[in-house]
Amino acid sequence: MTVTTALDPARLRRVFGAFPSGVTAIAALIGGRPVGLAASSFTSVSLDPPLVSVCVAHSSTTWPVLRPAPRVGVSVLSAGQEDACRRLSARDGDRFAALDWRSHDSGAVVLADAGAWLECSIEQQVRAGDHDIVILRVHDLDADEAISPLVFHGSQFRRLLA
Ligand SMILES: Cc1cc2nc3c(=O)[nH]c(=O)nc-3n(C[C@H](O)[C@H](O)[C@H](O)COP(=O)(O)O)c2cc1C
């Protein structure tokens, strides 16, 4: 264990959380049913080849189920999708039961009303502490710039003013 008391998890969370981010839903059909999780660690990586990344905790029980999917959908949640985000991170229940979602022929699952979606395959996975950095190759994508994003900052959901 390399974490010192000066860098305890609560302090790390507080300071890491000072960096505002969007929130994404990473999801795919597994055995015909949607499986997914909310992730705020999404970031764009490369234009050529087109790559994005997301960091997934080793403690995730959903990621090992999702990982074998040939394609995963990445949905950029919109300002009105706070509740969807809560559902997609909930420990219990069917995360998708009350959500409006669609699947692509590839099995990638995207949420209706998301501000953007990307269809990706897993390119590489890099162990990094208690997370894996998952590098995703983008095969298709679209965005509606008129849709305002959900923002996660300081452990709270926020919205852009303009
Ligand atoms: C706003 C928000 C952002 C999150 N971002 C991540 C993330 O980037 N990586 C991650 O592994 N889990 C993230 N989570 C937690 C997952 O959504 C999920 O709760 C966690 O993986 C535990 O569920 P599981 O065991 O089904 O995987 C986030 C949760 C919330 C509410």
Image (tube, helix red, strand yellow):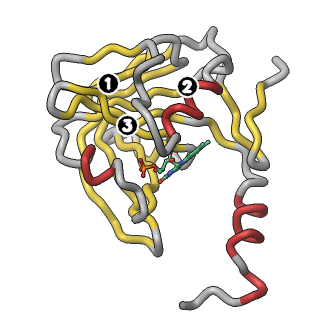
Look at 49% across and 21% down and name the residue there.
116
Q: Is the Cβ of the residue at disc 3 closer than 8 Å to that at disc 2?
A: no
Residue 84 disc label: 2
> Residue 147 is drawn in which quadrant?
top right
In this picture, is 27 found above or below 57? Answer: above
In the picture, measured across the screen, residue 96 lies left or right of residue 162, that is left
- Mark on residue 39? none
What residue does disc 3 label?
36
Quadrant position of residue 28: top left
**In what quadrant of the picture does the N terminus appear?**
bottom right
Please tell me which of labels 3 and 2 falls first in the chain: 3
Query: In the drawing, does residue 146 fall left or right of residue 128?
Result: right
For the residues labelled 3 and 1, the Cα–Cα distance comes to 8 Å
The residue beneath circle 1 is 109
Taking the spot 69% from the left edge, 90% from the top edge, the residue there is 4
Q: Secondary structure at mark 2?
A: helix
Whether residues under marks 3 and 1 lie with C-beta atoms below 8 angstroms apart, the answer is yes
- Count of numbered circles on the image: 3
Question: Does the beta carbon at disc 2 come under 8 Å from ligand 1?
Answer: no
Q: Residue furthest front?
A: 93
- Point 72% across, 44% down: residue: 20
- Mark 2: few, some, or many residues within 10 Å (few <14, many ≥20)? many
